[in-house]
Image (cartoon, rainbow, N blue to C red):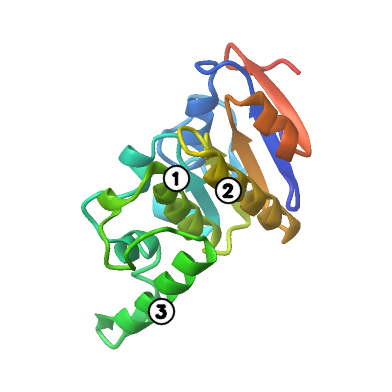
Amino acid sequence: FDLRCGEIVGIAGVEGNGQSELAAILTGLSRQQEGTVRINGKDASKMSIRKVREEQVSFISEDRMVYDLVREGTIEENLVSDRFYKKEYKKGLLMDRKKMGREAEELIEGYLVACDGKDAYMRTLSGGNMQKVITARECSSSPRLLIASQPTRGIDVGATEFIRKRLVELRSQGAAILLFSADLAEIMQVSDRTLVFHGGRTVA
């Protein structure tokens, strides 16, 4: 299938039919055994995870505690963990901590993260606020492609609606979004097109 800028494609189906494997392949966490993956027209089969991200691909994984955050890190550290090495965040040989701090504060405010400030530890946040931090980081990196795998699983109704709204806004700004969700209502609510997976294949 193709995914174009300015659309949300939802991947529906009972879990265990290849959705997790596809997300891992597209983000560089796994390698495909057959077929071709192209990002921005480039063969992504041998790209490192960082190279995939430098192609302006963002990823919200289905397991935030394993792949998306560092519980013992601060909110600021988690928000800049994908960009701290970039030139614009350097001040000579050191990191520009003031710039990072300002950006973290703006994201906390813009994504309505309920916390005690950027220096609070991630482990002190509720699941919904953890997911808002992850969404803030991934959506603020100017992605051309966002892969969102179960982005609202296990969080409260308010955070769920907020994150869905952000996905639609990002789509309206021209990003391509691939949404994996076991919640059919979520798929139907936000997707422009829907693919149904069964047995590792697209069946509808």
Which residue is found at the position 71% from the left and 26% from the top? Answer: 195
Which residue is found at the position 52% from the left and 52% from the top? Answer: 58
Task: Answer with mark 3 or mark 1, whichever residue precedes in sequence.
Answer: 3
> In the figure, 11 relative to 73: above or below?
above
Q: Position of residue 66 (x, y in %)?
A: 31, 38
Residue 92 is left or right of residue 139, and the answer is left
> Residue beneath label 2, please?
163
For the N terminus, the quadrant is top right
> Residue beneath label 3, please?
102
Kind of residue sitting beneath label 2: Ile
Which residue is found at the position 35% from the left and 76% from the top? Answer: 101
Report crowding for label 2: few under 14, some 14 to 19, many 20 or more residues within 10 A (C-alpha): many
For the C terminus, the quadrant is top right
> In the figure, 185 relative to 56: above or below?
above
Residue sitting farthest toward the top: 199
Element type where label 2 sits in the image: helix
Q: Position of residue 73 (x, y in %)?
A: 24, 57
Report crowding for label 3: few under 14, some 14 to 19, many 20 or more residues within 10 A (C-alpha): few
Element type where label 3 sits in the image: helix
Q: Nearer the viewer, mark 2 or mark 1?
A: 1
Residue sitting farthest toward the right: 192
Q: Nearer the viewer, mark 3 or mark 1?
A: 1
Residue 25 is left or right of residue 183, and the answer is left
Using the image as rendered, state which of residue 134 and residue 127 is in the foreground.
Answer: 127
Task: Answer with mark 2 or mark 1, whichever residue precedes in sequence.
Answer: 1
Q: Position of residue 161 (x, y in %)?
A: 61, 45
> Residue beneath label 1, please?
128
> In the figure, 112 relative to 129: above or below?
below
